[in-house]
Image (tube, rainbow, N blue to C red):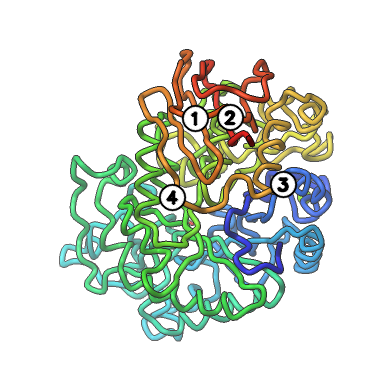
Amino acid sequence: MLERSGWWRGATVYQIYVRSWRDSDGDGTGDLTGIRERLDYLSWLGVDAIWLSPTMPSPNKDWGYDVSDYYGVHPDLGTLEDLDRLIAEAADRGIAIFLDLVPNHTSNEHPWFVDAAGGRRAAHRDYYVWAGPKADGSPPNNWLSATGRSAWSYDKLSGQYYLHNFLRDQPDLNWWDGRVHDEFDRILRYWFDRGVSGFRIDVANGLYKDALLRDNPPVEPTDHPAIKRGGLRPIYNANRPEVHEVYRHWRQIADSYSPPRALLGETWEFDPDRFGDYYGRGKPELHMAFNFLFVEAAFKSLELAAIVEGTLAALPSGATPVWTASNHDVGRFPSRWCDNDGRAIRAALLLLATLPGALVLYYGDELGMAEVDVPVTRQLDEMSLARPGRPSRDRARTPMPWTADKNAGFTAASARPWLPIGEHLANNVDTQEQDPGSVLNFWRQLAQLRKAGLVGTPGPLERVLLDEQVWAFRVGDVTTVANLSPKEAARDLGPGETLTVMASTNPERREKKVPPELVLGPWEALALGLSPG
Ligand code: NOJ
Ligand code: MG
């Protein structure tokens, strides 16, 4: 698949939080070799590409999202040679590798910032965003960081504040300085030259800040809940239009490679049209963009259908939509959406697998892995610790359960896993592989439909039926019907012939063909094909 141009269209991408997936050297932290040794599992899962959560050297204030060297590998995770080997052996299996690229900010220990903090005349001063205090000494404006406090920290030495939209250890880069563009051009080419297939771009909507540093306005009652959580509308400290020029340029770089490399943006944008803009209007930008309207949706038919249809209408033609329901920030869909009910988990996987476009699974989604209630004494995410009362992001970062052994086969039995394992022992890969009725084997069935190109290919979606229990849609020849409720639902899919059952979440449903009048069990979802003849 790597040879094919357009290889990302309809791809199944698997996000690996490297520290938590598999530890090969018994230090309690997952690593690159641990992944390489399980590439066969990923092939078996039907994965086309892996997105590795941050791999670059970092003081780990935000677990790699505070980069101190864009050209290296974090020693906890392995070496550059380990990464090269992983890329090569993945390519042998037709699996592409996405690295996580953090262009919005660096670590405060990055040599650029160490130099910049040396004084107003430092060579790298303008790589970052500095501004003087207001007359009363307070920060330059009202911008808030992800911790809910001021996004500015005071630097006594120079008498100026620097900007950080996240932790104070993550100073924001200043994209108004052309040298920052040149640095990232080099970084992109360096990794593409090494065989990396693409980047997941962190805070892709954030790079540029308002040149006048204007105050953000208050949120409005009609704003999306995710915006309201931030307290202010982030229209000046992020989401500036100038960012699109960066992606038009990066797209040219990505396209100059053979096979072309792909860009997948973390685009926190809740307006469908502005979200679509990240794919490029007229001139191409990102190949794929994370859809946070979908990620943040409730698992309800009317809401999901509205978001999916609204998204598809807003994307430029030919765009590859991306569907995802779990990640290391928002949590795991089996807990968030499905209350860990296996029936609902299967229905969610079937929906995700049959929507047209790329799918990003988070490690453990294929097992229906639940979030773990990490005791506060073992929590490691500073961003969450800074906001008590909100669930810790650590709940979705705990180790992958491979076996029923102590430490779940994630690391040596004698090691201390970096985050606790939780109560996953019954739900591990080993046990589920052997159980034909497991979530894992159900996912495999869906993956095979995707691999065969029967579902998941980008294309128009036609609504067949929608009410507050059931959503049915057709893409190409395949109809998806999902009862997103705990109550039985009898529905008629309309005039037509018998349909072939390609996949069903209900192990009791043994018929190979069904009439268009269906009785759906609680949380039952089906993928149905047209019956020949
Ligand atoms: C988004 C990442 O997914 C999150 O984990 C991180 O804290 C912020 N960006 C800042 O880099
Ligand atoms: Mg290790």
- Which of the two labelled residues, at mark 3 and mark 2, occupies the earlier sequence position? 3
**Residue 464 vertical position relative to residue 287 in the rendered view, above or below:** above
**Residue 288 % position (x, y):** 50, 60
Residue type at tag 4? Asn
**Residue 72 % position (x, y):** 68, 70
Binning the other alpha carbons within 10 Å of mark 4 as few (below 14), some (14 to 19) or many (20 upward) gives many
Q: Distance between the residues labelled 3 and 2?
A: 26 Å
Q: Is residue 422 visible?
A: yes
Q: Can residue 375 be seen in this view?
A: no
Residue for badge 4? 291
Q: Are marks 1 and 3 in contact (CB under 8 Å)?
A: no
**In the current view of this chain or complex, which residue is farthest to the top?**
488
Residue for badge 2? 499
Which of pointers 1 and 3 indicates the residue nearer the eye? 1
Q: How far apart are marks 3 and 4 (CA)?
A: 22 Å
- Which of the two labelled residues, at mark 1 and mark 3, occupies the earlier sequence position? 3
Local secondary structure at mark 2: strand
